[in-house]
Each structure stands twice: as structure tokens, then as C-alpha cells.
Image (cartoon, rainbow, N blue to C red):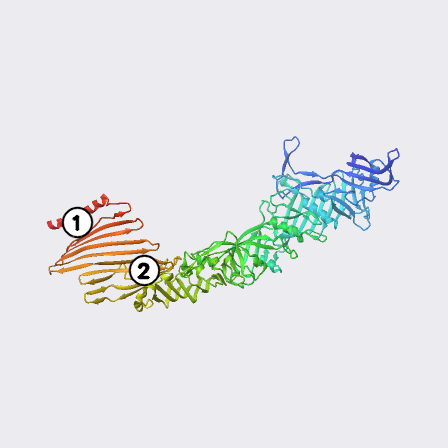
Amino acid sequence: MSDALLVRPADHLVIGVRWSGFTTDGTGVLIAGERARLTLWFPPQHVGEECSPPRSPAPLALAAGTTGTVVPGWRGMLAGPSRVVATMAAGRRIPLTANGILEAMSGVPLVVASAQETALEIPWRTILVPGAGTAGGAVVCRHGSAASTTGVQAMWRTRLVDAEVPAVAALTDAHLTVRAAEHDIANTADPDFGPAAPNNTLGTPRAVRTRLVAETAVRPATAARLELSALGATLHARGSWAAFEWEQRTVLGRDMLVRARFEGVLYPLGHRAEYLEVVTREFDTTAGGAAVLRRIGVLTVVEPVRRPPDNPGLRRRFPLGDIEIEQTTFTDLASPNSAVPGAGWQRTALPGIGEQSTHFRPTTTAGTPVLFPIRCTTGTGVLTFGLPLFFVAEIAVGAVSSLTDPGLAQRLSRDYGTQAVTCAPTPIDIAGTGGRARGDIHEVHGVTIAGIANQSLADGYRAGLDQLEIALPALRVLRGDDRLTSVRLSENYLRDGAADVLMEMVSNQTREIDFARDAGRSGGLVAPKYVADAISRSLGPVSLRALPHPATGLIDPAALFPSDQAALLGFPLKTLVTQLRLPPEITAVPRAGAAPEVRMQWRDVALRSTGTFVARPGTRLDLTVVASPDKNETLCAVKDFSLELPPGPQRVLRLTFATLTVTQRGGSAPDVSVDGIGVEFVGELTLLKELQDLVRLGDTGKLLDITTRGIAVRYALPLPPVTAGAFVMRNIALTAAIDIPFDGDPVSFTFGFASRVSPFQLSVMMFGGGGYLEIELDRDGLRRLEASLEFGAFVAVDFVVASGEVHALGGVRFTLERGGAVTLCGYLRIGGCVEVLGLISVSVELCLSLTYRPERNALVGRATLVIEVDLTLWSDSVELDSGEWVLAGGAARRPALRDRDTAMAQWLEYRAAFVGVGRG
């Protein structure tokens, strides 16, 4: 094998020559042997040039010689050498001159079996192997004329044509095919033009080059013109395949036009689209008049609307109906071949095809992802939002297609991740069944969209809802809770469209359904409190831990209501409810053209005995709350139960209720109805049973006191005075009260004989006294027991001119509170008054008290003297208070000096008043 360089300055001929299988005769003539081959090596036939968006400035400023001025510049990369190979007939004699070599190669069929023979690097890093365009044809070289008719020397060139093309055919009738070979060379990374010009690209980028290798391996492109010269190649070639088109026009190694069109889909929604990129050479005045390459890219959505899939499982994953991309053409795009961050092609190895540019994220030239305007039309509402998408190229080579490759689908899912978008509040039928259940339709404020990694690709790519941001109007109305909730479609529902639990709340988005702090919103009697972490189609917010057991259909009350604050009449629901089949149902019922109607229902709930609450077979709880702009009703009723106070064998009182009902309509005050109430004294109070006929609580005077804290129903039974000779008992009353708090505290019952503010009075001749007895009970037993007895004597005299009375009374008050705290107080009251002719009245009252303070373990005393003088034209009173002093136990304390000084000042003021009267 020998080499030589042929240079002919007259027509710029510069080629290398390599021959093998030849011998020489000693006179400079080559003689071909049996396997003689002649190879011509051409200098670089193409310049890979930098191209930029229209009207963008030149990336470089180059010095114009020594003039001190600069000219705009763009960068370029020379291609590697090209070669043509021909086999010579045995015995052929070829002079070893430029003319001899060129004449030997003219018209001889070239060897084009592979890229190891005739191979042309046109364009940069694309190895083209020419082929004949006719059956049985051959590729031959036809050299141009050495001189023109005008005597001007022409540049040497050679045309590659099909041997069947006549010699007089036009320059664009080469009738060749071309195949791109050498995938590894085509896969060479494009030049990095640097961060100063991130939107600049190569004219024929890697995505086009590797695609040409894959496509032409099955069906070659066509070339209407293919010429080689010392200054570069001229190429007119094009190809059209199932999902890809390419066209390139190059003159003397410089591109005039490069056009590439990629068909594909938009991931993850699956709409058909195409990306077209066109590079043209333009004389650009903004670049100093230079003939530069400019690039434009256009993304076109060719399938604006996609219908829901036939596969019910995929429909459940994305229940948003028809999906329309409202804008179909996008032009202000960064090239996926550029260095704009996030905009570039991603490359994936495809089985049977090799590594290809498979997908990119459409991005603006400013570097922000394109937000495709999406409109989803459902049976209940329309969602509109902007969503970034991927363009996925369809690469269909033979029986292989990128869009059905599961490996690419999994990679797309990873690369795309999730995209959260917001939208105007819209009612959406999540189940897509026309609202079969009340919990199917929800107010959607945003969705998080993801691709599905493992899906059937026969229908193309489909998206899934990774999360939804929904409002819960029921909680907003019932609890004033207007926060949004992040939920996911439950796996059970995705597998089985008949599953009742439609959505599950994400881990940090569980919602507390808490009426314990505002039981008035749930009827006052019952205060549910539980954590909801899922949405049921029939029940609304539910707890996954407290769903009906598959075998029994029953709910564990302790799992549903773990907190004691969830209560009925103050009794924990977890110990009160039994045979529970449904949790409280909280749903928003859609209404056409109006706000939804919110319902909270818990009907026919069986109750069992616990503590002081005694249930019967028919004991039931019913709760219904209806709220809408034109209707607000609350009904809560507890039927057929008793309260035995205190609980256990020490019970002394039994209250029986046929029905305890709280009803509220609109903005009116709650109406409390107590039907069939009965009172029975048991145990140690059986002796009072004779009074029971008098104590008909349902028939006595009733006082209903309604506040924001709760409802108090108070009953009073006044009894007439009892007189028997010198025995007189007055101010007798039996009282009872039921307190129903709205803050979750237990219901309490108070029973009294008279009261502290109005004690009974007893007198026997000159001796008298009084007192009261009050007992307060709740579910835990005794809350307070207070009793007071007072005794003493009264003496009254009347001398016509003057009258008066003197009394001396003593008493004791005993208070026993929950926890065993005892307060014991003894007191003595001594006083009297005198009145003269109705003009002058003087009264004196001295009260001495001794009180045991258990919290201080001290016996505390106090003395108070009250003197009142009433004249016809003047009156005044003086109160002298010793303050408290400790008689025993605790830290000793005597009246402070200032206490004595104050008392003395009051006494002097009192005395001075009388002195003044006497002087008058």
C-alpha cells in the first residue's frame, strides 16, 4: 500500500491517493493486479457552524486584521476527511499523475458496501455512505471540466451519481441514496458554545445525526446532488420516515438549509405533537451583514383534545374527563440542542436502536419551562391550569417504537416527577360516575400530576393524579375550618372502582373532626372528636383505623374516638356506643347552580350503660345537621335513658328521660325539649320518696337559660308555709337543675332544699333559724355537697314611742367538694335595732366567723361590725372589718397596722357624725 498527495494549484486540486494491489513498470505507471484498489482522500468537506436565534447578536467579536476594528464572528468545526474507493480491473495501466489518477477514477463503480469503504463525513460527524438510486445501478464519480469556454479556470470538483443517470443530466439529478453509518461517531457530543450564548446550537445536531443512523439503516435517504471539492461538499439530500423528516442543503461545505421534524407526543398527557427545527443562512444586518445561520424551532400540538381512556383503571387514575391543550403552536422556544439549562434532549438507549435523543422539556429562550394551557372538561366542572410537559420523540424503526418501550416509560416517569398546579375552585366528580355517591364530588383547588411508570402503552401515555388539593365544605360550614386538604386516590379504589374509600389524606394532612370545644355545632348533646385521614364516598371524612371490620361489619369505638373529649352528655363515646356500624356521616350534597348543602348525620346509634348513664334496649342517639345558604337545622336527640347519681351502689337519685332533644332552626336560639322525665329517690334517700309526688319536674316551673357555653334547664317547686301553733316554717322550695355544657364537660344535676341566697326560715316562739341543702352530681359522682343550718333567738319589744328587736344567731355551713376538699364554717350573729317615732332608726350587726381552710390547714377568724343610722334628713352606715386572722395552723397573721388604722378612722368618722348632730 502506497500513498501520494496530488496538488494542482490551477484548479485548487488537493487530494490524497492511496493504492493497493498495483505494481509499477519503472516509468511512473501503475499496473493493476487482481485486487487492485484506488482510494482518493479528500480534505474536510463540511464545516459544522454555530447557529443562533433570529436577531441575536454575534457570539464573538474578531479583530479585522491590523485595522483596529472588529467584525462579528461565529464558531465552526471542520469535519474529518472523506474518501471514495474504487476497484480497478486487473492489468489496467494508470499513469501516476493527477490527470492519470483522476481519469482512472472517473466512471468506475465505487465500493459502497460499508462505511469502511467509500465514506463521506457530510455533515459534521455524520458518515454518509452513498448508494445507487436504481436497481442494479452503481455509484460513479464524474469530474468537472478543467476550464470553461471563457478561459477562466474552474475549481475542480467531482460529482457522485448513479451510473444510470445520463452525463448531460442536471446537477440535481444524481439519483443517489445515502445511509448514515457509524453510530458512535454520530453520537459525538455537540460543541459547547459556552454560557455567553446558551441558545446557540450546531446546524446538524446530535439528535438529528443519531436519528439518521437509525432511520437510514432500514430505509436510506435520497440525495439529488452530491459533489466533492477542495473547498467542501455540495449536498442536496432529504429523507422522510414514519415519524421523522430531514432535509439538508449544503454548498461547498457550508450549510444553506437544515430542516428536521420530529413527531411525538406530549408526556404525560399523551397528545400527539411535532417539533420542527429549521436552520437557514441569512444575510443579517444585525450581525454586520454577515451570512450567518439562524435557527427557529416550532412545537405544534396536532392532537389538541384527548378523550378519557377506555381502560377503567387508567380513567380512575385521572378522572378529569376530556383534556384539551388550548394553544397549539409554540415558537419562542430554546432549542433542545442548546445549552439552555433544562431544555436539552435526554438520551436513552432503546432496544434494537441504540442511544437516541428521546425527550426534552419545552423551554422558552429565557430558560423557563413552557406552561401548556390545559382545559379539563368533566361532567361537573371545568378545570383550567398551566402545566409543563415533555416532548417525547416517536422513534419507530422496523417493529421497534420508543413510545411502546416500557423502559423509556419508566424513565419518563422518573424524569418528569410530579407537577403541582393550582386552579380555580371547581366541583369535580372524582369517581367519574355521575355522582353516584354524595362523597364523589369534591371542590378541587389544585392537582399534582405525574406520569404512570407501569401502564399499558397501547393507548399511548396517560397521566395520573398524584395528589389533589381539595376543600371540605362540610368542615368549613360545620367547624369553620376552611383549610385545603392534600389527598391521594386510595390504592383500593384504584384497584376496584366499587371501593368506598375514595381518597386518603397525605401523612401530614390529617384533619381533626373536633366538636368537643364547640358542641353547639353538633347539637349540644353530643360532641364527636376523631381524626379523619380518608374520604369515603358515602360518609365523607373517615378514619382508616375505624372502618367496619370485614367479618362483623362493626366499628371499634375506641379506635374511632380515642379521646375522652369525644362525648355524649359528658360520657366518653368510646365507652358509650355499641354495635357501631357507621361513623358520623359528614358530606356536602351538590346542588345545581347553588352552594352545596352540608349534612352531618349519625342515626339510630345504639348506646350502652356506662357510669351514671343507664341504657335500655331502645336507647338511641339521633343527630342530623343540615346547613345551606337557605336552610340551617340541627336536631339531636337521646332516647330512653336514665342517669343514676352517684354511680354505683351508692346511688341515691335516678333521673329517667323518655327523650332529651335539642332543636335549632336558622339563627334562632336552641329549643330544648325534655319529655317523659321522672325522678326517683333510691338508696339512702328512699325516705324522701313521700315527697316524690310533689316533685314532678316535668310539671313545675321551668327556666331555660341558653348561653354560648350551654343550656341550663332549672326547675323550682315552691311549697306553702307550714304552721302549727308556735311552729312556723317559711320559704320552703325544692329545686332541681340540669346543666348541658357545649364545651364537652359532663352533664350535671343539682338538687336542693332551699338555697344559699334564699334559705328556709324556721321559728318556734322567740327561737328561730334556717338553712339550705344543695347537692350537685355528674357522671363521676358527687361534685359538691353544701349544707347550712342556723339557730338562735329573736326578742322584739314595742313601747309605742319606741320599738326594737334583739337577736342572737349561730350557725354552721359545711361544703364537701370533689376530691374530698372540705370547708367548714361556724358563725355568730349578734345585733339589734331601735326605732323612735319613725324618725330615728339605729341598727347594729356584729358577725363573728370561724372557718377551716383545708388548703392552708388553718382555722381563720374574721369579725365584721355594721352600724347604720337613719335620721329623717340624713343617713349613713359604717362597716368595721377586722380582716382575717389565723387562730391555729398555717402561717400566723394578725391584722396589719393599716387595717387597725383604717378601722379606727372609720370609727372616728362615725363618732364625729353624732357629735355634729348633738351640737345642732
- Image location (x, y in percent) of residue 768: 20, 60
Viewer-closest of 564 and 801: 564
Residue at the spot of label 1: 910
Q: Amino acid at mark 2?
A: Ile
Residue denoted by label 2: 775
Would you identify the image quadrant in which residue 479 lies? Answer: bottom left
Compared across the picture, whether 94 is left or right of 495 comes to right
Residue at the extreme top? 66
Q: Secondary structure at mark 2?
A: strand
- Quarter of the rendering containing residue 761: bottom left
How many numbered markers are drawn?
Answer: 2
Does the rendering let one see residue 754? yes
Tell which of 814 and 635 is nearer to you: 814
The picture places residue 896, in percent across and down from the top left corner, at: 24, 44
Asked if residue 367 lies left or right of residue 688, the reply is right
* Residue depicted at x 24% and y 45%: 894
Pick whichever of labels 1 and 2 is earlier in the sequence.
Answer: 2
